[in-house]
Amino acid sequence: MSDEPQRWTPRDPSGDEGGKSEEDAGGSDPQDGTASGTAETGASATAKEGKGRKGRANRPRRKGWRRLVPTWRMVLGAVLLIAVLLVGGFVAGYQLVGIPAANSSATAQSNVYLYRDGAVIARDGDVNRENVQLAQVPKDVQHAVLAAEDRNFYSERAVDVGAMLRAAWNTVTGQGRQGGSTITQQYVKNYYLGQEQTVVRKVKEFFIAIKLDREQTKDQIFEGYLNTSYFGRNAYGIQAAAQAYYGKDVTDVDVAEGAYLASLLNAPSAYDVVAHPENKPAVLARWTYVLDGMVKEEWLGASARAALTFPPPGEAKASTGLSGQRGYLVDAVKDYLTGHGIVDEGTLATGGYRITTTLEKEKQDAFVDAVEENVTSRTDDGNEADRNVRVGGASIAPATGEVVALYGGIDYTRQYVNNATRRDYQVGSTFKPFVFTAAVANDSTTQDGRRITPNTRYDGTNERPVQGRQGDTGYAPANEDDVSYGDITVREATDKSVNAVYAQMAEDVGPEKVEETAISLGIPEDTPDLTASPSIALGPATASVLDMAEAYATLANHGRHGTYTLVAKVTKDGRSIALPGRTTRQAVSREAADTTTAILRSVVEGGTGTAARAAGRPAAGKTGTAEEDKAAWFAGYTPDLATVVAVMGQDPETGTQESLYGALGQSRVNGGGAPAETWADYTAAALEGSEVQEFDLDLAEGSEEPDPSEDESPSADPDFPSDTPSGDTPTTPAGTTPATPGPTGTGAGGTTGTGPTGGGNTGGATANGGTANGGTTGATTDAGTTEGDGEPGTTTGETGDGGGPTGDRSTGGSPVEGARGPDRGPNFPYPWQ
C-alpha cells in the first residue's frame, strides 16, 4: 500500500451530484481501470441500501387471493380510525347536546273529536297528574316498578348499550320491536323529548341520559320517572294511577296492587282488564312476571308471594265531559288510531290532535233513541234482572265500510266497558249465516253427495248426533226449547234457527272452511273460541258487535270485504296526519253472499226476525242467543246499512256475565225481541228520507225459492224426496215385497206418465194434479220413491213435479230432464233415511 495519503472527494452536503464532473463523480477513462472500481462501489452501495431497510431483503409482492385479505396493519389502522371517530363523535355529541326544557307532555293539550259534519263529540285534554315525592311511594311499589322495567337501575349506568344493541337486533331480525332503554332513558323520553321513533331522538336520548345521570341522583331520576309515566285512563304518574285504578293514594297501595300498576307501564290501555276483559290472561302473565322478579331480586319473600292474589281494579271514573255516549265513541276512536298505527298511545295522550270521525250525528242520536225506546224504558229499578242489562250496537255503510253510529252503553261514566267493541260474549246463531256462505262458496255437498242450497233437506231432530265421514262425531246439539223439526229445508232451518241442521251442515262443509269464510268476511282471526269444529255453527265465538257488523256488511256488499273505518281525518298543528288507505277484496263469491242474503230475507219475512220488518225497508237478518241466554243478538242489513244490536247480561258489581231471564218484563230475552225491535226503529230513523233500495241478488244455481203455487210438501224437493208417505196409502219397510210397476196417472196438463219400478207397496197417492206415479220401497212421491232401488220414471201434468233420479219431469206438458240423484239404500248414513 502507498505511503502517500489517500485523497477523498468530499460529499456534497446537499446530496445533489448532478453538477459534478465525471471525474469528481468517480468516472474515468475506461482504460485506466477505475470503472470496475466504480462498479464495485455501486454494488457495495446497493447492498448497504438493502441493509438500511431494517436489515432484511425486500419481500415479494402478494399475489392472487392474498391480495384481497387485509394485512394486520390495515386492520389495526381501521380499528384505530373507528375508535377515533367514535371518541370524537361522543365528545362532539356530549358537547353539542344539552339538557332541554320539559316537553309539551308536562302541559298536554286537548284532543278534539268531531262528527263527520264537524260537530264536537268530546274533548279529552284534561291531563290527570299529581306529582309525589319518592318517599311517599311505598318500597314495595318502587320495587314492583323496578322489577317490571329495570331491575338493575340503581347499579347500572344511565345507558345500557348492550340492551340497546340486543333490542335493535331483535327488531331487525323480525322478533318484534323491543325496548332497550333504562329507566333513565325512559324518563328522558317522557319528560324532555317525545315518543317518536327516530334515530335523531334516540341519539339525543343517549347523551341527555348520560348528562342527567351525572347531574341528578338515582332517586331524583326515579322520582321523575314515576311522576311522568303514562298508566292509561288518562293518568300520568303513579299517584294518578293509584286513584284511577284503585281509588286510593299511592301511599296506601299494597304490593299486589303495585305489581298491577307496574304491569300497566308495558301496555297501559291493553292491560286495563276492566276495559278489555278478554286480555286478562296476558295481564295475569305480566303481573306474575313482576312479582316473580321481586322474589328473584330478594325484594319479596317467596311465602309472601305465594299468598298474593290478583287485585281487580275498579271501574274508571271518567270526566263528565265524556258522559253519555261520548266516552264510548272517544274510546273506540282511540283504539282505532292506535290499533292501525296512525298515532301511538303515548303520543296521542300528549294531546293537540283534531280527529274527524266517520260518525254521523243524526244516526248516532237515532241509535240512542231506539235503545231508550226498546230497552232502557222497559227496565224496572225494582227488578233484579234489569240491573244486569247492557246494550251494544254498531252500524256500518256497506259500500264504504264507514262506521256511522255506535252504541257503547247507557253512560260512559256509569258503565265504563264499551259494549260495541268488547269481545267476551258469544254471538250465538248470528254466526249460522257464515256456515251457509261457506257451503255455497265451496260448492259443498251433503255426505251423500247432494249440493247444499236453500232447498236442501236435513234432519232437524233435537239432539241428533252429527255424522262425520267416519261416522258419529259424538256431538249432538239441542235445538232451542228442545224442539224436533224432522225433515226440513235449509231455508226453513234458517228461519227457525235449527241447531241440529247447522251443526251437521258445518261438518258437511268442513269446520276449517267455515272458520276461513268467517275470517274472510271480517271476523278477526284471533277471536276467542273461534274453533274449527261442528259446534262453530252455534256461535261460541266471542266476536264484538263491531266485528259482526263488519262481517254482515260484507254480505250486504255482495261478498266484497274491506275493513271498517272510523276516522276520516286527523290533523295536528294544522297539518294532516297520514291515514291508511282502505282496500277491498272479494272475500267470497257474489253468488255465495247473495244466496245467503236470500235466506236471511226469509228470516225477516217469516222466521224468527219478523220484528225487523218494522223498519219498512227490504231487510235481511239473523237472530242469535248466547249460551244460558247471557246475550241476545240481531244482526241485519238493508242494501245500504248493516247494523248489529246485542243485549247482554252483566252483574254491575262483580262484572260476571249473567242470564237475561226475567229482564225487560219477559221470561226470556231473545234476538227476535228487543234486539230486532231496536234494530228496526234505528234503521227506519237512520234511513228516513233516503230512497228505498231493493236487493239486487245473483243467486247460486238451484237456490230459487219454490213457487208457492207448487206443492210445498217435502216431496217437492227433487234433491231430497221425502220419507213421509203421500196420502193415506200405508207402507211397509223397504224391500219387503217384490217390485211392481206403479199405476199410470194423468195430470192437469193432459199428458200421461209412468212411475218407476221399485220394491214395496204398489201404487201411490194423488198429488199435484194427477195420480202420483207410485212406486215401491217406502214412501211414495210424485215421481218415485225415496228409498231402495228403482228405475227412473217420469211424471206429467201441469203442476206435476219431480222425477226419478234421472227421470223427466213436465211443467205444463213440456218435458225437462231431471238431475241424477244419489242412491238411497237402507244403509244411507243419515238415520232419518
Image (tube, grey):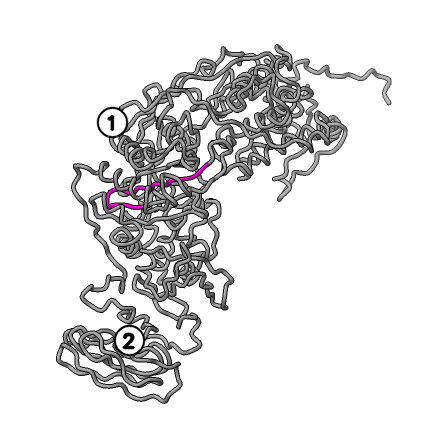
CB contact under 8 Å: marks 2 and 1: no
Q: Position of residue 232 (x, y in %)?
A: 49, 25
Left or right for 800, reference 514: left
Q: Quadrant of residue 564?
A: top left
Residue 643 magenta-highlighted? yes
Q: Earlier in the sequence, mark 2 or mark 1?
A: 1
- List x then y, in percent, for residue 28: 69, 25
Check the image and report above or below for 783 versus 354: below
Where residue 520 sits in the image (x, y, percent)? 38, 49
Residue type marked 2? Ser
| Residue 303 in sight | yes
Which image quarter is the C terminus in? Answer: bottom left
Q: Which residues are magenta?
A: 636-650
Instruction: Examine the image and state in which quarter residue 583 appears.
Output: top left
Which residue has dot 2 on it?
726
As drawn, is 785 to the left or to the right of 297?
Answer: left
Residue 32 visible? The answer is: no
Type of secondary structure dominating the magenta stretch: strand
Pick whichever, 508 or 43, lies toward us.
Answer: 508
Q: Secondary structure at mark 1?
A: loop
Where on the picture, by quarter, is residue 782?
bottom left
The nearer-to-camera label among 2 and 1 is: 2
The residue singled out by tag 1 in the image is 117
Q: Secondary structure at mark 2?
A: loop
